[in-house]
């Protein structure tokens, strides 16, 4: 007996029609946009009152500046492809090639430009003599003579560098970089999470320096990072606008307290924490689910639905405070410390872990700031021993942190800076934006994703899973969403990322930023965000 085509159509499973995204950072916005482009009706809920997460904006002394991420790695085409789809390709810019410096106890020196994570590709390079000294260089050179198996089993960046190149390279080159970027000591940083492929290249090439050089060379020609004229916050703004164009329902101030299966229909539902103003608690639904929050929140919400997932809970990220200063200071016109500095933990006279001289790094910032006016951003939140609490600087009130930042900027830049030269300042605080990728993190991520495979109508994205940086987040998010859609019968072709139709020109977006669509974040908004239970990546 044969079955008629009509009967086959009636018995075929219906494809999902709706999707729910929890978390409105770049990962959540990208996921929601791709789901909507596949034809689903999408709802995105975000705990704070703005979208974009760590890719946002704030206004300081009349300048609209990035409040978080200011660049993206060019090692893959993930971000450039997304920017092209959003009509932002013509905004891509590269930073000043002068590079950054290292602040060591004896003073500032130019940072080596080769390798990754501060690991030098060539331990014989003349530029290493000053930061390492003769004995340090001699020990680093041993990397080329040691068998490839030495250090290959180390799980942390610190253990690997110490075994291959010695303590001096770790303390003077790698720790300032790692602490400045990840707010974590190299001994607590999972090498596979922050430098995928490094250990494999070590086994293949026989030395850590060669492996670091190979990873560096794998990036496209030119600068290893790029940004946008106007700031990376334009990415968040354009994602919001395009999601709205595609019909995505964007909901802010929706702090999820529980996640459950929908008893009335196939799919998921989330329940909002009871608002303080007494509004009725809302329920959001979707047949497909994408979790785009920080790691602890994702695991907590999925814990009642996915067996054993609680075993893979990541540690909460470090607390970070960014102090942005706008200065009238002609003495900085010569960019005395290149594009900024990374600070050694052994330096006691300053408390900042890094400084970015934004007007020296980005031409667009210098253009907007004007003659003799400079923008510097200092990062606070040095790595602290486990269980000892946050770095004391991040607990300071804004006015005290700004005062500290003025003194630190003067010391680091080697230029006297008086309080009267301060035109404006702002402090932005992040509590969970940066995942803590300590040793064992990669194994937890692998275990979590293995457990989530048993739930075919759900996916999870974000920096805690993909690795830090926009390149990793965007690439992994789009891969996870594509996999989810293909599993449910959607025709997702490899070139589905064509330029979006109907997006506004960049100059229209710029004009609209006087009243931003929720992506510009003030210091007060960032503090409110840090108190919520659903944080975005």
Image (tube, rainbow, N blue to C red):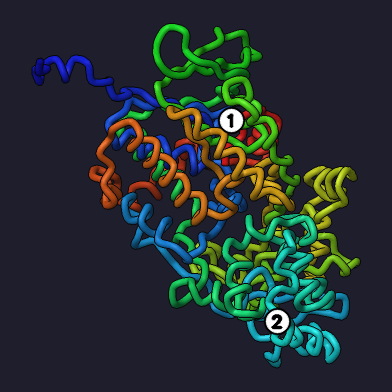
Q: Residue at x 58, y 25 (%)?
A: 306
Q: Is residue 55 left or right of residue 508?
A: right
The residue that mark 1 highlights is: 48
Residue 185 on image: x %, y % = 79, 59
| Circles 2 and 1: CB atoms closer than 8 Å | no
| Percent x, y of residue 527 | 70, 36
Q: Secondary structure at mark 1?
A: loop
Q: Secondary structure at mark 2?
A: strand
Q: Which dot marks residue 110?
A: 2
* Residue at screen point 27% across, 52% down: 495
Q: Position of residue 373 (x, y in %)?
A: 62, 67
Q: Earlier in the sequence, mark 2 or mark 1?
A: 1
Q: Nearer the viewer, residue 190 or 185?
A: 190
Is 475 located above or below residue 163 in the figure? above
Left or right position of 22 against 255: left
Q: Mark on residue 363?
A: none
Residues 108 and 290: in front is: 290
């Amino acid at each position: 007996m044969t079955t008629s085509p009509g009967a086959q159509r009636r018995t075929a499973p219906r494809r999902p029609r709706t999707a729910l995204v929890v978390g409105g950072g770049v990962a959540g916005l990208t996921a929601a946009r791709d789901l909507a482009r596949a034809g689903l009706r999408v709802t995105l809920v975000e705990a704070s009152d703005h979208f974009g997460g760590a890719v946002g904006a704030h206004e300081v002394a009349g300048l609209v500046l990035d409040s978080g991420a200011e660049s993206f790695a060019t090692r893959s085409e993930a971000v450039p492809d997304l920017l092209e789809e959003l009509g932002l390709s013509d905004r891509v810019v590269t930073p000043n090639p002068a590079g950054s410096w290292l602040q060591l106890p004896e003073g500032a020196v130019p940072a080596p430009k080769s390798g990754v994570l501060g690991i030098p590709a060539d331990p014989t390079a003349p530029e290493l003599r000053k930061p390492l000294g003769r004995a340090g260089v001699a020990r680093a050179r041993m990397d080329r003579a040691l068998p490839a198996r030495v250090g290959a089993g180390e799980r942390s960046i610190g253990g690997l560098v110490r075994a291959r190149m010695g303590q001096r390279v770790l303390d003077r080159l790698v720790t300032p970089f790692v602490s400045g970027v990840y707010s974590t000591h190299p001994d607590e940083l999972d090498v596979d999470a922050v430098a995928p492929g490094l250990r494999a290249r070590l086994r293949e090439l026989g030395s850590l320096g060669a492996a670091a050089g190979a990873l560096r060379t794998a990036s496209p020609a030119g600068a290893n990072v790029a940004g946008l004229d106007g700031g990376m916050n334009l990415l968040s703004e354009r994602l919001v606008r395009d999601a709205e164009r595609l019909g995505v329902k964007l909901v802010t101030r929706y702090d999820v307290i529980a996640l459950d299966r929908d008893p009335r229909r196939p799919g998921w539902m989330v329940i909002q924490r009871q608002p303080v103003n007494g509004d009725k608690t809302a329920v959001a639904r979707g047949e497909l689910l994408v979790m785009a929050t920080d790691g602890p929140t994702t695991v907590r919400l999925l814990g009642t639905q996915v067996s054993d997932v609680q075993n893979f809970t990541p540690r909460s990220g470090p607390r970070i405070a960014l102090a942005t200063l706008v200065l009238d200071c002609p003495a900085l016109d010569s960019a005395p410390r290149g594009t900024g500095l990374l600070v050694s933990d052994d330096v006691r006279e300053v408390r900042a872990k890094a400084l970015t001289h934004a007007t020296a790094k980005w031409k667009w910032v210098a253009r907007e700031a004007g003659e003799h006016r400079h923008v510097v951003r200092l990062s606070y939140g040095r790595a602290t021993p486990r269980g000892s609490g946050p770095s004391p600087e991040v607990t300071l009130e804004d006015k005290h942190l700004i005062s500290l930042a003025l003194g630190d900027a003067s010391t680091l830049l080697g230029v006297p800076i008086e309080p009267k030269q301060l035109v404006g300042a702002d402090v932005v605080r992040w509590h969970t934006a940066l995942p803590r990728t300590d040793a064992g993190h990669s194994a937890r991520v692998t275990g979590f994703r293995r457990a989530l495979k048993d739930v075919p109508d759900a996916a999870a994205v974000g920096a805690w899973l993909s690795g830090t940086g926009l390149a990793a987040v965007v690439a992994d998010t789009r891969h996870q969403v594509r996999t989810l859609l293909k599993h449910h019968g959607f025709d997702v072709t490899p070139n589905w990322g064509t330029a979006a139709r109907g997006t506004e020109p960049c100059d229209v977006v710029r004009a609209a930023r006087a009243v931003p669509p929720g992506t510009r974040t003030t210091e007060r908004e960032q503090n409110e965000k840090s108190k919520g239970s659903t944080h975005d990546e």
